[in-house]
């Protein structure tokens, strides 16, 4: 068992960049969809003065 523990760092080094990339992909996609939905729901009226 102790022989496999030395590979723990390598396993973590493989999965941390993958997790970071998935996190960025999900957050950017979520923000984009949210902005598109809000822009459709509340459009910006250009040139209209009250």
Image (cartoon, helix red, strand yellow):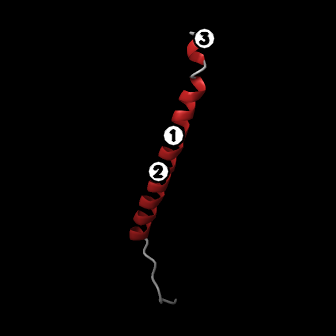
Labels in figure, total: 3
Q: Residue at x 58, y 23 (%)?
A: 8
For the residues labelled 3 and 2, the Cα–Cα distance comes to 36 Å
Q: Which of pointers 1 and 2 lies earlier in the amino acid sequence?
A: 1
Looking at the rendered image, the quarter that the N terminus falls into is: top right
Q: Identify the residue under disc 3.
A: 2
Q: Nearer the viewer, residue 28 or 10?
A: 10
Disc 3 residue crowd, few under 14, some 14–19, many 20+, Cα 10 Å: few
Mark 3: secondary structure: helix
Q: Identify the residue under disc 1.
A: 19
Residue 3 location, x and y as percent?
Answer: 58, 12
Q: Nearer the viewer, residue 23 or 30?
A: 23
Q: Which of pointers 1 and 3 lies earlier in the amino acid sequence?
A: 3
Mark 2: secondary structure: helix
Disc 2 residue crowd, few under 14, some 14–19, many 20+, Cα 10 Å: few
Does the residue at mark 1 contact the one at mark 3 (Cβ under 8 Å)?
A: no
Q: Nearer the viewer, residue 11 or 44?
A: 11
Q: Residue at x 44, y 55 (%)?
A: 29
Q: Nearer the viewer, mark 3 or mark 2?
A: 3
Q: Nearer the viewer, residue 38 or 23?
A: 23
Q: Residue at x 54, y 41 (%)?
A: 17
Q: Quadrant of residue 38?
A: bottom left
Q: Relative to 4, is 17 above or below?
A: below
Q: Which of pointers 3 and 2 lies earlier in the amino acid sequence?
A: 3
The dot on residue 3 is none
The dot on residue 25 is 2
Mark 1: secondary structure: helix
Residue at the extreme top: 1
Disc 1 residue crowd, few under 14, some 14–19, many 20+, Cα 10 Å: few
Q: Relative to 20, is 45 above or below?
A: below
Q: Please indicate whether residue 5 sits to the left or right of residue 48 in the image.
A: right
């Amino acid at each position: 068992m102790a022989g496999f523990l030395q590979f723990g760092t390598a396993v973590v080094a493989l999965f941390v960049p993958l997790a970071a990339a998935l996190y960025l992909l999900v957050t950017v996609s979520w923000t984009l969809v949210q902005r598109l939905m809000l822009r459709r729901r509340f459009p910006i009226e250009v040139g209209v003065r009250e």
